[in-house]
Amino acid sequence: MQTLSKMYQLILGDFRERTRRYSFLITLLATLFFGYLVITGKWTLRLGEYRGVYNSAWVGSLMGSASTMMLAFFGFYLVKNSLSRDRRTGVGQILAATPLSNLAYLTSKFISNFAVLTFMAAVLMATAVVMQLLSHVEGGFNLWALVAPFLFVCLPVMALVAAMAVLFESIRWLRGTVGNILYIFIAEFAFLNHLLLENPFLDFGGFGMFIPSMEEAALAAYPEAKLGIEVGFVGLIEGATDGAMNLFRWEGIDWSLEMVPLRLLWIGCAICMVAVATVSFNRFDPARTGRIRSRRRAKKSLPAAEVVSGHRPSARSWSDMPAVQFRFNFLRMLTAELRLMLKGYHWSWYAIAVGLVAVQLAVPYDYARLYALPAAWIWPLPIWSAMGTREARFNTGQLVFSSAYPLSRQFPAIWAAGLTVALLAGGGMLIRALLVGEGDHFKALLVGVLFVPTFALALGTLSGSRKLFEVIYLIIWYIGPVNGLPLLDFLGATDAAVEGSIPLIYLAMSIVLGFSAFLWRRRLC
Amino acid sequence: MNLEIREVGKRYKGNVWGIKDFSLDLGPGILGLIGPNGAGKSTLMRILATVTKATTGRVKWDGIDIARSPNRVRKVLGYLPQDFGIYPNLNAVEFLRYLASARGISGRSARERIDQLLELVNMVDARKRPLGALSGGMKQRVGIAQALLNDPKLLIVDEPTAGLDPEERVRFRNLLAELSGDRIVILSSHIVSDVEAAATSIAVIKEGSLQVHAAPEDLLRTVEGKTWEMTIASSELADAKQRFVLSGTVRTRDGVRIRIVADESPGKSAAPLTPTMEDAYLYMLAGKRTEAV
C-alpha cells in the first residue's frame, strides 16, 4: 500500500512536471492541428476513388488510427526524457537512496508516460466528439463508434510506446541519438509494413482491421469499383481531389470479444517490456556509466600518491605571469568548434564515417547517389543535432555568452564547423559529381551541404534540444533522399528533385533558417 | 577604472524582484558580496557579467552602459558563475583553449597562459583527463582558471570556493589577494570567512536590497560592544533564539554556551566578547543598518 502511494506521488509529480513544459504545449498544439486536418479531410484515407462519408464510425476510425500513428511517431520523443531528467537533475540519486524498487520506479515512469500520451489522445478524441456534435452527421451521432477506435487501437499502442521509452532510457546506448534513429525505423516498420497489417495482432494502426470492412461497404455500394488504398495528406496523394470522391456509408466494425483481448494484449506486452527494463536499469549508479569508468582508467595512469591527495604546492605565482596577447583568429575558433563537435565518439564511429565516404568514391555513380550518399548523411546526425544546443545541454551558456562578441565569433564558427562536417560527409559524392560533369547534381549537393547544418543550427538554437532536429531530419531524410519524394530530397539524390529546381527551395530555406538562428541566438547573447 | 551600478533592478515572472534599486560605485579592490541564499547575489553577478539584462537602472563600466555595449566590458571580464557546466569529452587544456579562442586570445599566448593557469590552480596532473571524469572541486578549479584566462580587469566570482577542500580554499584566498591591485574583483559568497579574508570592502545584500557597503573594519565597528557570551539551560535555548541574534552555540556540561549579538547586555551573566565579521553580518541581517562606508 505504501509503495502504491509512493508510486502515485511519483506519477503525479512527473505528469505535472511534463505537462507544464513548453514542449508539451507545442506537441499538444501540433496534435490538435493534425486532428483538425483529419476532421476536415485534409489527411484522409481513400480506397482508390472511393471513401466513406464522415459519419461517427469513419471519423472515429480515421482519427483513432491517425492519432495512433502521430503519437507513436512523435509522442515517443516527447516522453523519452523522464529518466534522463532524473539523472540530470540528481533527483534520480535521491530516489535511488529510498526503498523504492526498480520495478516500482520504472512502472511509475511507464504510467506517467502513458498518462501524457493518453491525455493527448483524449484531447484528439474530445475534438472529434465535439466536431461531430457540432456538424450535421448522416445517420446520427454514435458515441461508441467514435470512441472505440481510441480505446482499442490508440491506447494499447500508447502503452507500448510508453514502455519503449522507459526501455530505451534504461539501456545506455539507446538513450541518445542511436535510440532516436532506431525508434523511427521500428515505428516506420510497425506502421507501414503491409505484412504486419494482415496480422490482426501486429496491426498497430488498426488499418488492417478497418480496411477490409470498408472495402466490403464500398463494393456493396459500387459493385464495379476498382479499389486501392491511399492514406495521407490530400495534396500529396496523386489523382483526384477529395471533392471528386465517390462516397459510401460505412458503419464501423464489430468490436468482438475475440478482437478486443487481442488489442489489449499489447498492454501486457508493455508491462513485460518495463520488467525487462529493470534488468538494464542502473538505478542512477554513476559507477556503472562509461564516464566513471574513464575516470578510473585516468586515475590508474596517475601515481598513487597523486590520486590520494590530489595536491601539490603550486609552483606558479600570479605575479610572474606574462601579459596576455589578444588577436582573434576565426580559423582557431573553427578548429576548437570542430574538436568539440567530433570528440567523444568511439573509434568505430570515425572508421564507419570514413568508410561511407570511400563507398561514395568506389561504387558506380548512380548507386553512390541513390544509396551511399543518403547513408553517409545520416551518420553525422548526432554531430549536427548538437549544434546550437551545447550551451543549454552542458550549462556552459554563462561562460560562452559572457565572452566578447559571441554572436560574430562563436556563432559563425559553429555553423562553419557543421558545414565542414557536411562537406566531409558528402565529399566523395561531390568529387564524383565534379569529375563526371554532373554540374546540376553538384550544385544540388552543395545546397544540401548548406541546408543541413543551417537547419540543425536553427532548430537547435530555437529549441535548445537535439530531439527536434533529429526527429524532423530523420523523417525528411527517410521520405526525401531515401524514398525519393522530390519535394523532400534536399540532397538532390533523385533526378526529379534536381530537374524540378527543388535545391532552389532549400537554398532559400537555408537563408531564412540561418537568419532565424542568428536572431534567436542574439536573444541569448 | 570604475564600475557604476545605479538603481539596478531585475524583475522575474510573477512580479518577483531578484534585486531592486541596487546602487554601488566600485573602484579597484576586492568587493565581498555576502547575503543569505536567495538574497539576489547571483542575479546581480549575472547582470554585471552581461549574461542577464537589468529590468531597471544602469550599470556603467568606465562610463559606458554595459547593456548597450556589452562587448566593452566582456573584453576585460573574467566570470565564474555559481552554477556552470563543462564539456565532458574535452580535457582541461582543450576546454580552456576553446574559451581562449572565443575570447580572442592569440594562439601562442593562450597556450602559455593555459599551462601557467593550470599550474596556478594545481591542475597540472589532471590536465589531460576528460572533464567529465573530474571531481566537483577539480571542475571548480578549471572554472577558476577560465575566469583568469584573459587577465581580467573585472573579475566576478560567484561562490568560487564551493566544492573546494580546505587546502584549495586557502590557495584560492591567497590567489585573490595576489590578484587585487589594478582590477575590480567582486567575490560573492555566503561563507563570511572567505569574504573576510580577501575583501577590501564588503556589501551585505538581503532580499534584493543593499543593506550596507563598508570597509571590513567599519563593519566590525558596528558591533563593537554588542557581542556577548553566556551559558543558559538547554530548555531556554528556543526562547533565546526568539529573543536574540545568536551567532554561535556550544553544548557544555552546564548547558548551552551561546554567542549573542545585541545592543545591550542580554543578562547579568553575559560577558562581552571581541566581535567577528560573522557577528557583524548577522547583526546586519537582523535589520540593523549602518551609515558607515
Image (cartoon, rainbow, N blue to C red):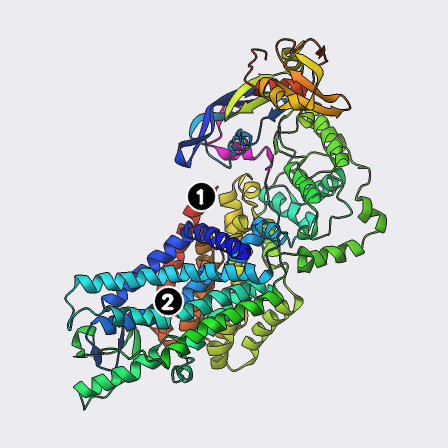
Who's the residue at 23% across and 88% down the image?
Answer: A226
Quarter of the figure that contains the C terminus of chain B:
top right
Chain letter of mark 2 equals: A
Magenta stretch? B61-83
Query: Can residue B14 be seen in the rendering of this structure?
Result: yes
The residue that label 1 is drawn on is: A522
Give the percent coordinates (x, y) of residue B64: 49, 26
Instruction: Give the numbered dot on residue A70.
Output: 2
Give the percent coordinates (x, y) of residue A119: 37, 59
Mark before the other along the chain sequence, 1 or 2: 2
Tag nearer the camera, 1 or 2: 2
Who's the residue at 58% across and 57% down the image?
Answer: A341
Q: Secondary structure at mark 2?
A: helix
Up-down: is A423 above or below A230?
above
Q: Is residue A73 left or right of residue A138?
A: right
Magenta span contains residue B73? yes
Q: Quadrant of residue B186?
A: top right
Query: Can residue A445 be seen in the rendering of this structure?
Result: no
Q: Separation of disc 1 and disc 2 at Cα?
A: 34 Å
Q: Is residue A425 left or right of residue B139?
A: left
Residue lying furthest bottom: A224
